[in-house]
Amino acid sequence: MKNIEKGQSALVNDTCTDCGSYADIGAVIDEHDTVLVIEKLGAEALEQLETLVKLAKVRFDAVQADIVEIEGGQQLSLTFAFSAEKMIFQLQNNL
């Protein structure tokens, strides 16, 4: 932990003064990580991805979806407004 503290900016405060815990938040959440890419193969790929699109749009207002054909299936790109939305969606849908 001492080496990590030495290597970071003096502006970073990653120790909870209330509980004494250390957390490297930047390693967990990247504010620019808003695109979730999912590939499905087989005959039911498009149907499975369209179901995920519906779930995402019901849960989050500004989510954008793009499905493209790949060899043997489909690829879905979901773009969320915030990285936290992406993480919540992944957790709620076991992705």
Image (spheres, rainbow, N blue to C red):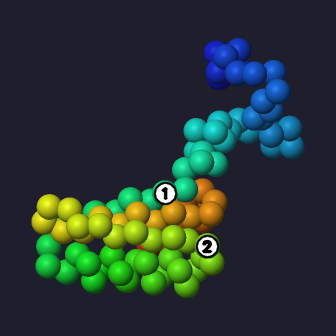
At x 51%, y 63%, the residue is 79
Q: Amino acid at mark 1?
A: Val
Name the residue beneath numbered marker 2: 62
For mark 1, give the secondary structure.
strand
Q: Earlier in the sequence, mark 2 or mark 1?
A: 1
Front-lying residue, 75 or 12: 75
- The answer to whether residue 89 is left or right of residue 76 is right
Asked whether the viewer can see residue 91, the reply is: no
For badge 2, the amino acid type reads: Ala
x then y, percent, for residue 28:
58, 45
* Front position in the image: 7 or 55: 55
Indicate the quadrant where residue 14 lies.
top right
Q: Residue 37: give x, y in percent of width and height.
A: 38, 59
Residue 93 in the image: state x and y as whole percent: 44, 73
For the C terminus, the quadrant is: bottom left
Q: Residues within 10 Å of mark 1 (few under 14, many from 20)?
A: some
- 3D distance between C-alphas at marks 2 and 1: 12 Å
- Residue 35 numbered tag: 1
How many numbered marks have been drawn onto this rendered protein structure? 2
Question: Eyeballing the image, is 30 above or below 41?
Answer: above
Left or right? Give the position of 56 relative to 61. left
Q: Image point 53% across, 80% down: which residue? A: 57
Q: Nearer the viewer, residue 59 or 74?
A: 74
In terms of image quadrants, where is residue 22?
top right
Front residue of this view, candidates 68 and 55: 68
Q: Is residue 44 above or below residue 14?
A: below
